[in-house]
Image (cartoon, rainbow, N blue to C red):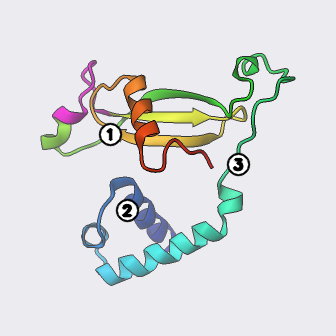
């Protein structure tokens, strides 16, 4: 298997919460191969976590950047956005926004260096930002940033 296919299977599994059987069917691989390659990719990702994952720092009181002065003692700014998605036709009504596009509502937190430090995807329909934030806060692990 190529490295691109292994990473594609890994990301597809994480993004779509699919089981090995579904991934194997989609990529024409056995469930055992999918499982083995997924764990291989996961181990590589965990070894590189210090390089791949960003540990944010608070915005200090003496911040001179005009855009971030209002965010003193915060890790960053958060906002919701819509990401256009392709879903099966029977699922489209759930993802239709108030403007008629097929999209997913995503909550993101961005640090001053424009790196994402938190992303909560998966909201269907037009959900208010506060509703998505409330859901993020009420999750078992809470609203945690690395």
Place of residue 64 in the rendered image (x, y in percent of width and height, measured from the top left): 85, 20
Whether residue 36 sits left or right of residue 86 in the image: it is right
- Quarter of the figure with the N terminus: bottom left
Compare marks 1 and 3 and give the one earlier in the sequence: 3
Residue range of the region highlighted in magenta in the rendering: 93-103
Judge whether residue 11 can be spotted in this image.
Answer: yes
Q: Does 136 lie within the magenta span? A: no
Question: Residue drawn at (52%, 41%), measured in percent from left and top?
Answer: 143
Q: How far apart are labels 2 and 1 at the CA level?
A: 16 Å
Q: Which residue is mark 2?
A: 13
Residue that appears at 29% across and 67% down:
19
Name the residue beneath numbered marker 3.
55
How far apart are the alpha carbons under marks 1 and 3?
A: 29 Å
Contact? badges 1 and 3 (CB < 8 Å): no
At mark 2, the secondary structure is helix
Q: Which of label 1 and label 3 is nearer to you?
A: 3
Mark with earlier residue (3, 2): 2
């Amino acid at each position: 298997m190529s490295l691109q296919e292994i990473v594609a299977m890994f990301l597809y599994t994480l993004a779509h919460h699919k089981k090995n059987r579904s991934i194997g069917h989609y990529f024409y691989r056995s469930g055992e191969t999918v499982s083995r390659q997924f764990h291989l990719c996961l181990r590589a990702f965990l070894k590189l976590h210090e390089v791949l994952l960003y540990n944010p720092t608070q915005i200090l009181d003496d911040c001179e950047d005009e855009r971030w002065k209002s965010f003193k003692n915060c890790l960053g700014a958060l906002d919701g956005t819509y990401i256009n998605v392709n879903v099966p036709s029977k699922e489209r009504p759930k993802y239709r926004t108030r403007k008629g596009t097929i999209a997913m509502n995503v909550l993101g937190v961005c640090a001053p260096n424009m790196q994402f430090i938190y992303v909560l995807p998966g909201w269907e329909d037009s959900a208010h930002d506060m509703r998505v934030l409330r859901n993020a806060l009420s999750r078992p692990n809470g609203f945690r940033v690395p």
